[in-house]
Amino acid sequence: MTGPGITGPGVEGPNVGGPGIGGPGVKAGDELPPLEIPLTRTLIVAGALASRDYQDVHHDAEAAREKGSPDIFMNILTTNGLVGRYLTDHFGPRCTLRTIAIRLGAPNYPGDTMTLRGTVTEVAGGTATVRIVGTNRLGNHVTGTVTLNLPEGAP
Amino acid sequence: MEVSASNDPARPNEPGRPNDPARPKEPGHRKVPDRPRVPDRPRVPARPRVPARPAEEAPPSDLTARLKAYEGRPAATAGVGKDPVNAAMIRHWCEVMGDACPAYSGPDAIAPPAMLQVWTMGGLSGHTDRSAAYEELFGLLDGAGFTSVVATDCEQEYLRPLRPGERITFDAVIESVSERKTTKLGAGHFVTTRMDVRADGELAGTHRFRILKYAPARTEPKAARPRPVINRDNAGFWEGVRQHRLLIQRCDGCGTPRFPWLPGCHACGSPDWTAVEASGTGTVHSYVVMHHPPFPAFDPPYAVGLIELAEGVRMVSNVIGVPHDKVRIGMAVRLEFLRVDAELELPVFRAVEDGAV
């Protein structure tokens, strides 16, 4: 499988480029395999820039400290992108993301690792609802809900 | 779509000025009569209570009302994305995310849906599409000291895919402004906006975004342990500590040992004495465990022991080397000197295993 980018800086997971699981057989209670994302400084800065977010707290550690943060931290757009990737990695390129709703909690600081987990909570009319949570060593970095349309042939 | 009400656990107020009724680091026991309380810093004269803010400035409740007046007003009007949807930005995004989904490349590529907000970002040159109302709202918050910003919630709905070449336009409304909230980051107000994003004029997605505008809580360094009060009567004791010698006094008249250091003998009244070095062995005569209230320089719970030295005098100190709840009366201890910080070293007592001294 070819994609625009097979690996990102420090971003690897067991499902990268995987075939995807969609269509019939997706049911409430299904758990997605967890995805571990090493939170390198490079990933945090590159994510901020790729999302055109130049807030200094996402790339300038000194400025972050002046604002009460111990270090730079990941911006919400990067978290959103990683959540989107986690879902499409699992359900495959033929699924269609409908909504992503996330809330941030404990910041993603450099040197930590975030583990994304997901549970299918509902499947109805070809649309699956997945509850996601991303944890780091401080606690829940992100919690949220994603809905997506499964490929045709789904229940 | 999840609609959420933001809150963060309130951080309890830090206690005020260091205070230390247990005085665990100061040798000496409670029989010291009426020692004058020498303040360790110049006393600041009490200031008369004056209103904290100028009369013309609104109190906080009025600020909230003024902030809430912006609800429903536009945050951005007829905004235009600085770049059309394009393959380069999509590729850069996918590289960062490690997203290898084939839908995002090739002749029929779509943009990753989660990029929705990216196409509306102001970038390094800043936003040019924000409404006057939005700028006023931020000005009010900045002026009230809520100068920092952090995003807390993002809720996006994708109505149709975005494709390279499409021109992005957007409008946004200030959906809500919260009352003042106390968060781990500091006190502030949550501001929620809702944006409609169009591609070539067609509604392609909605984006609800919540930020916290806050005044950063000051991150204070851990407080220093209180300094001992050193005076003419006890200077010899602290000089001994500096040399790692635990010195007590012995009366030249009757031979009675005494501690803490005092000018005269409590047994015979003689003003003459000789400093002698204690062996450093002793036992826990009594103890308390400090749980509450916490003091900035200490991490409760911790044990404060009344140590009876082999020489027969007692001193208050920390018992270390044993959990606070394992300290027992009669426990054998041995002197150690604890380097607290660059300026301060204190005699403390380590529990001795099996009573071996």
Image (spheres, coloured by chain):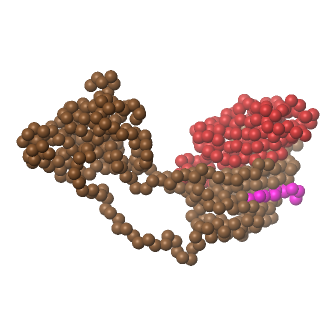
Tell me where residue B316 appears, x and y as whole percent.
Answer: 29, 41
Which residue occupies the extreme right position in the image?
Answer: A153
First to last magenta residue range: B193-203
Q: Residue at x 67, y 60 (%)?
A: B178
Q: Is residue B279 at all visible to an observer of this figure?
A: yes
Q: Residue at x 69, y 66 (%)?
A: B68
> Which chain corresponds to the colour brown?
B
Q: Residue at x 24, y 30 (%)?
A: B281
Relative to B36, does residue A28 appear above or below in the rendering? above
Q: Is residue B64 left or right of residue B314?
A: right
Q: Residue at x 76, y 67 (%)?
A: B73
Give yes or no for residue A147 being in the magenta stretch.
no
Give yes or no for residue B201 being in the magenta stretch.
yes
Q: Is residue B115 at all visible to an observer of this figure?
A: no
Q: Quadrant of the C terminus of chain B?
A: top left
Tell me where residue B100 appears, x and y as whole percent.
Answer: 77, 36
> Which chain corresponds to the colour red?
A
Tell me where residue B147 appears, x and y as whole percent.
Answer: 59, 61
